[in-house]
Image: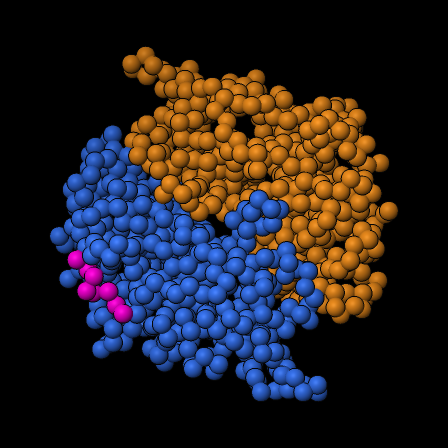
Chain colours: A orange, B blue
Amino acid sequence: MTATTEGISRRSALGLIGGLAVASAAAGVVSARSASASASAVPADDVVPFRGEHQAGITTAAQDRLHMVAFDVVTESREELVALLTAWTAAAERMTVGRDAGPVGAVDGIPEAPPDDTGEAIGLSPARLTLTFGIGPSLFRDADGRDRFGLADRRPAELEELPEFAGDQLDPERGGGDLCIQACSDDPQVAVHAVRNLARIGFGTVRVRWSQLGFGRTSSTSTAQTTPRNLMGFKDGTSNIDAEDAAGLADHVWVQPGEGAGWMVGGSYLVARRIRMTIETWDRVSLAEQEAVIGRDKREGAPLTGTREHDEPDFAAVGSDGAPVMPATAHVRLAHPTQNGGARMLRRGYSFVDGTDGLGRLDAGLFFLAYMRDPRTSFVPVQQRLARSDALNEYLRHVGSAVFAVPPGVQEGEHWAQSLFT
Amino acid sequence: MTATTEGISRRSALGLIGGLAVASAAAGVVSARSASASASAVPADDVVPFRGEHQAGITTAAQDRLHMVAFDVVTESREELVALLTAWTAAAERMTVGRDAGPVGAVDGIPEAPPDDTGEAIGLSPARLTLTFGIGPSLFRDADGRDRFGLADRRPAELEELPEFAGDQLDPERGGGDLCIQACSDDPQVAVHAVRNLARIGFGTVRVRWSQLGFGRTSSTSTAQTTPRNLMGFKDGTSNIDAEDAAGLADHVWVQPGEGAGWMVGGSYLVARRIRMTIETWDRVSLAEQEAVIGRDKREGAPLTGTREHDEPDFAAVGSDGAPVMPATAHVRLAHPTQNGGARMLRRGYSFVDGTDGLGRLDAGLFFLAYMRDPRTSFVPVQQRLARSDALNEYLRHVGSAVFAVPPGVQEGEHWAQSLFT
């Protein structure tokens, strides 16, 4: 089937009953949010274009809040899966301009139908909502090696399950997933609303596997943004690839023509890691030791060999005692591109606090998100190195892990990942 | 011991080693946040006064984000408990004006000491941070009936453990607590930073029992605020008591002279309930049914007997079929003051999403917070009524519960709950 943004009835598309019909503009249905949006026009600054060469939400200046969700596909029908992607794309595009996922009122003239939008974002600006879609390795072949949707021979070589890293303490329920959607917005209610409505549309076709809220961005992805601090209190992501760095993006983020799977050109690969910080332990470490572990000073964020945040670290510098100023196990040294054959990633992580762990400690940390052209040559070797030697490991625990192929941007008349299915 | 805001060394006060000294202005220590605050002055609008007749964070126009924490006291020493309250009060006041909990740099000239602030709020505005302190019944007498701190005869009669309500599915690890701190701010990182630093200061004296982030306010506590929507998509708290309603506050929120425990005059009682919403089920209910369950229309928030949000419900109105327009089991009817002998509360709840429940559903809902003069005559009878008959019960599960006495405001030179200990 084909679909445009405005003209799709998910009820007929999916053959499901009750509550799944997306707004049909042809039927003249006007949703509450669009009505309120036209009454008080949404400022253009609040809308990030949904369609384009690349998906939004990667180089978009990192929004303040995250709600990310991973799904397992529960249908065995390729047709149903494609219908869902079509319906999702239409709803996603509507929501990114501040409209409802579907009408809140009577649907298709059936007053008994549940509203097609859950309502909690009525009246809110989209607050730069982006919805970024990805596909996990398990969609191509399940754990038993079964080609679930006739896609096995289209799996990009770059999309491999991540290897186990030293010290990993992964909870399978916090990782993996056939599909993922990263919702970012400056308003958490808008991000939560989007994920919830997409999950609702997917009911019967997909099942939520895990979901993660992030309350504060820990990366900048634009030179216009200041560098935020993570829950260790340090500035994070100072040398990130940003939206203004076209060469860096081409070299390290976007899949280029002629490489890998053709359907992924213009796409990227996303690594997600739920990294619990043992902040109570960290907080009992002296400032000098914290700075030696990170390799930067805490207040300014300058490398220990410099004075300003954006000074390049000098890994050769030695102190009066003959020891390197930047310790051999400092996080900044081990993660730095010059120490990793030039490997770089666009980091886009968020801080999280998910209550308490039952042992009187906050369940807090970094939800690491990074986009890259090939995890096999960037995230994997860097993380292997970090897992072996990083002084920071004493204060971290990787408890969730996932990798996704993030298809290129959606063109007019297309749905998410259309290039994979055609 | 006595303490002023500026002149206290927690290290000496608590006799603990490492990392627990609060900034001593006398020692000339300037913290990073205060330095940055003086460089770019914090706008007055961003600061809510910490001291006053009542604690801040009750009638303060509800901030956007919440981090609430409950503690169990692990010391048996009343002196240590009072020392902690003194240290907490000093750190809390500092943070509410955008300063650090303590210095980030070398403390008391000891470079090996851990920084006294964890750093993640450096450079951030306090964003209207309020820190509101409460005391649970278990501080007065533990489960074995032991008078732990010589306070048993000072327990206010109003502060009783809540009774069990029909349908309660309480998880003890998500409820109770000897002490609580409600941190509200428009910036979640500021609220998280405050709770984390207070927990850190309390290390060895208290232990985190539970903590809850709320991403979006579900109540207005000022006529200047619009009514937000909860995760059912409905406007919530339309008829809330607000800061401008002095008579309502005196009648329903603030403990009055001559009643109950004298040390509580000017204080209030806080009921906290973690209410999980089965949103996936709710989302499959028709709009008409949702509106009948709530008793309001979804878009405008008007009672079913009216047309505008603030119209008073007409519980006597009957439709052409002779049935009440507002159903007998509608939430609005059962919770309304006119149906509950005039009982009102100041509600101050937040929406939460804490990932997934392992069954493919979002762990989402309402973290209900309400302040009142006497829970025995307000929350308890109202909730007993709701638990029996509310049509909404089908979509709710109360999984956490706590009640706290919230002492009056802190005067100059005092610490939290000083009136209880003198």
In front of the other: A380 or B176 = B176
- Please tell me how many numbered marks the rendered image carries: 0
Which quadrant holds residue A333?
top left
Magenta stretch: includes residue B154 = yes
Extent of the magenta region: B150-157
* Residue B341 visible, this orientation: yes
Residue at 33 percent across and 59 percent down: it is B132
**Viewer-proximal residue among A218 and B387:** B387
Tell me if residue B202 comes above or below residue B344 in the rendering: above
Image x and y of residue B73, in percent: 27, 49
Q: In this view, does A76 lie to the left or right of A245?
A: right
Outermost residue, right side: A1
Residue at x 46% of width, y 38% of height: A365
Residue A418 inside the magenta-drawn segment: no
Q: Magenta: predominant secondary structure element? A: loop
Say above or below: A34 vs A229.
below
